[in-house]
Image: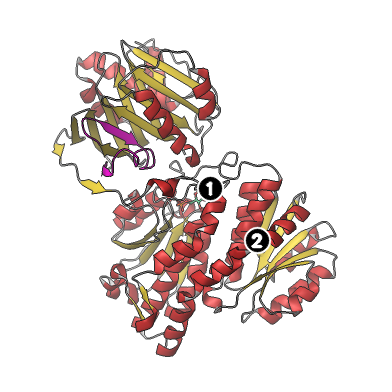
Amino acid sequence: MCGIVGYTGSREAYPVILKGLKRLEYRGYDSSGVALINNGLKVYKKKGKVAELEESVIGKDLHAHVGIGHTRWATHGEPSDRNAHPHVSNSGQLAMIHNGIIENYVPIKNDLLKKGYTFSSDTDTEVLLNFIEDIKKNNNCTLEEALRIALKRIVGAYCILLVAADDPETIIAARKGSPLVIGIGKGEHFLASDASPIIEYTKEVVYVNDYEIAIVRPDELILKNLGNEKQTPFITKLDMELAAIEKGGYDHFMIKEIHEQPDTIHDCLRGRLLAEHGQIVMSGIEDHLEALTQAQRIVIVACGTSWHAGLIAEYMIEELCRIPVEVEYASEFRYRNPIIHKGDVIIAISQSGETADTLVALEKAKEQGAFIFGVVNAVCSSIARISHAGAYTHAGPEIGVASTKAFTGQLAVLAMMALKIGYSKGTLSHERYLQLINELNAIPEKVKEILQDTSHIQAIATKYKDAHDFLFLGRGYNFPVALEGALKLKEISYIHAEGYPAAEMKHGPIALVDENLPVLFVATKDSYYEKIVSNVQEIKARKGKVIAVATSGDTVIPSMANDTIFVPDTDEVIAPLLSVIPLQLLSYYVGIAKGIDVDKPRNLAKSVTVE
Ligand code: G6P
């Protein structure tokens, strides 16, 4: 969601910014633009893809050594050329890009209108920019000071980059709630929403904190808080290779990321799951073992696919640790005045570590004394930083909008957590602990087995690609997998799909079943197996088309299903790590068969940094 890039240094700024914007395309956007400074401001912006912006500026003067660029995901005002960023102030002297939402922009806009300011867009960003300009004029102060005053008066979230026509060296940046990374080069600086536009130039970065302002010039990076006090920039070394954010021979990032899963799960387990010693080593847990084992309640807070991982964790933790678990949509949790007791443990699950609803929910819980444990993929992200403790999923950058490898990484971390806590608490026997460690250790090879030949899944996708609706059913650990399968299909094929607990299907969705409705059962061999066999029969009796994900060697489910996809056998506690893979592939192939841009499906954003 909204990508930000800035450059100041001796290179030509435009190519750096353009490439950066392309690297950020995965976040989801609907228009883009750049502002360059060279003998005044030059601003170019365009609705649509970055490639359309690129085409529209052919032949234009693009020479500059400082500039800012933006991909916009519409919040205030439709996607259009005029609502695209950068915005220019009334004097024509300032240009700004913004990621986030200014909540009190209406009264500010009304005041500015009374003063004679005019607006050429519907955005809150243009209001903030003119507000800054007005403060600068009235107080006769520097741009930095005007920004500081403005930021103290606004309510909302922001990452902004600001440039002035008369200063062809400086970018002023500020953040609260929306991410900002600054790459440090030799006599140059790169600014971006995440490290992907920066990685090919430098690995030394500074993650700007909330309520900080950065004054960035080729040879200088000054960080200050809103009280105008200098802060020491904390330089971090990026642990990421360029190849991780490129397609590497695959047609799409999504299929590359699906195929990476044997490695990403292995990376996640490496050094933590010591199968040969029958041990799990996780410092984030060991350092806080008391808080975790003594927790009276665990609340899991997340959104989207991460929320589904949370539901699976609920089954794992309640079974293995006997601690009551609640799984909350972050967006609901943050607004409903939740009851939080001191000593409650909050587990935050997030791929990006920047999801606004999750972040704010955590801030609230933290204020009320909860202990926050982050299960996060993006290293040094905001959620990772506000957590008291945590465990990274180590899945590497996930670029495809639909989450795949991050989800299985989350499941692997959550399984290790449940095992470790349960065993330490004594709710999990040594024998069962060892059994599950060994099963988990075997997962990467079993995922590889599923991925060896996917042509059968592709054929099933082709067969059902024209369906209007889909039902996904599962029980126990596979119920959240059904939800995830439905979400995946919706996201990248635009087919309406619902996930349900297979037994609950009788209380409504069964009315939809006829010979046209494909019903996908996640029906692997587990303690619910006999029950789900009956559910399959109930659908067959109503002529529904059954697609089943079944355990290799099973003959009962395949004899009833129209199509079966087999997965290797494993323990039911970790079965979702295998049963979700065919669902990811099915969605991918349906999306492809329908000609959809699966990496960037319409309206979706990878990192949802507005509420
Ligand atoms: C967006 C993405 C989803 C993701 C969700 C939560 O909707 O498109 O793939 O599951 O945000 O994101 P997070 O980064 O917090 O896991």
Q: Residue at x 60, y 67 (%)?
A: 450
Q: Residue at x 55, y 68 (%)?
A: 447
**What's the distance in space between the residues labelled 1 and 2, CA to CA?**
17 Å
Q: Position of residue 200 (x, y in %)?
A: 35, 40
The correct choice, above or below, for 69 with respect to 529 in the image is above
Residue 107 seen in the current view? no
Label 1 CA crowd tier, 10 Å (few <14, some 14–19, many 20+):
few
The correct choice, above or below, for 141 with respect to 400 in the image is above
**Residue 160 falls in which quadrant of the image?**
top left
Q: Nearer the viewer, residue 186 or 539?
A: 186
* Left or right: residue 526 compared with residue 340: right
Colour mapping used in the image: secondary structure
Q: How many marks?
A: 2
Q: Earlier in the sequence, mark 1 or mark 2?
A: 1
Q: Position of residue 588 (x, y in %)?
A: 63, 52
Q: Which mark is residue 249?
A: 1
Q: Which residue is mark 2?
A: 454
Q: For the residue marked with disc 2, what is the amino acid?
A: Thr
Instruction: For mark 1, give the secondary structure.
Output: loop
Q: Nearer the viewer, residue 86 or 295?
A: 86
Q: For the residue marked with disc 1, what is the amino acid?
A: Gly
Residue 239 seen in the current view? yes
Point out the stretch of residues depicted in magenta.
185-206
Q: Residue at x 85, y 60 (%)?
A: 515
Instruction: For mark 2, give the secondary structure.
Output: loop
| In magenta segment, residue 210 | no
